[in-house]
Image (cartoon, helix red, strand yellow):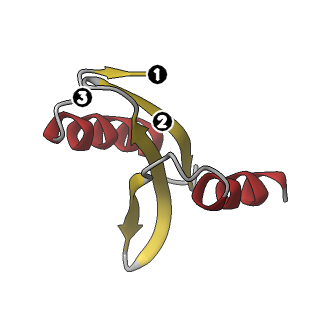
Amino acid sequence: NHERIAIQKFFEGFPQITPLGFVLRIDGRNKGFSLYEKVQNVHSVVHFLKADVSHYGIFEFLMHQTAVELQKISCRYIN
């Protein structure tokens, strides 16, 4: 699976990246996740945003929550 390899490389192949993220659990099961990094003082990059699409609005929730988490560490911009 190409996505799995890309995620593995995100964690292993880029020592300059400090990966940040979270897992969304619904009814005790992993249903989505967001992986991102802070790249400059107020900038960030979201590398992966994956979710179980059977849950209506899950991508919007993940993106909103990602923005909330990035705001906590003084990020103002998401690429």
- Amino acid, disc 2: Val
| Closer-to-camera residue (34/24) | 34
| Mark 2, other Cα within 10 Å: few <14 / some 14–19 / many ≥20 | some
Q: Secondary structure at mark 2?
A: strand
- Amino acid, disc 3: Cys
**Residue 1, horizontal then vertical, whole percent:** 85, 59
Q: Which residue is mark 3?
A: 75
Work out how far the residue at label 1 is from the one at label 3, CA to CA, in angstroms: 11 Å
Mark 2 near mark 3, Cβ–Cβ under 8 Å? no
Q: Which residue is mark 1?
A: 79
On the image, which quarter does residue 13 sit in? Answer: bottom right
Q: Which residue is mark 2?
A: 46
Q: Secondary structure at mark 3?
A: loop
**Residue 25, horizontal then vertical, whole percent:** 38, 68
**Residue 17, horizontal then vertical, whole percent:** 49, 46
Q: How many marks?
A: 3
| Closer-to-camera residue (57/3) | 3
Does residue 47 lie above or below 26 as drawn? Answer: above
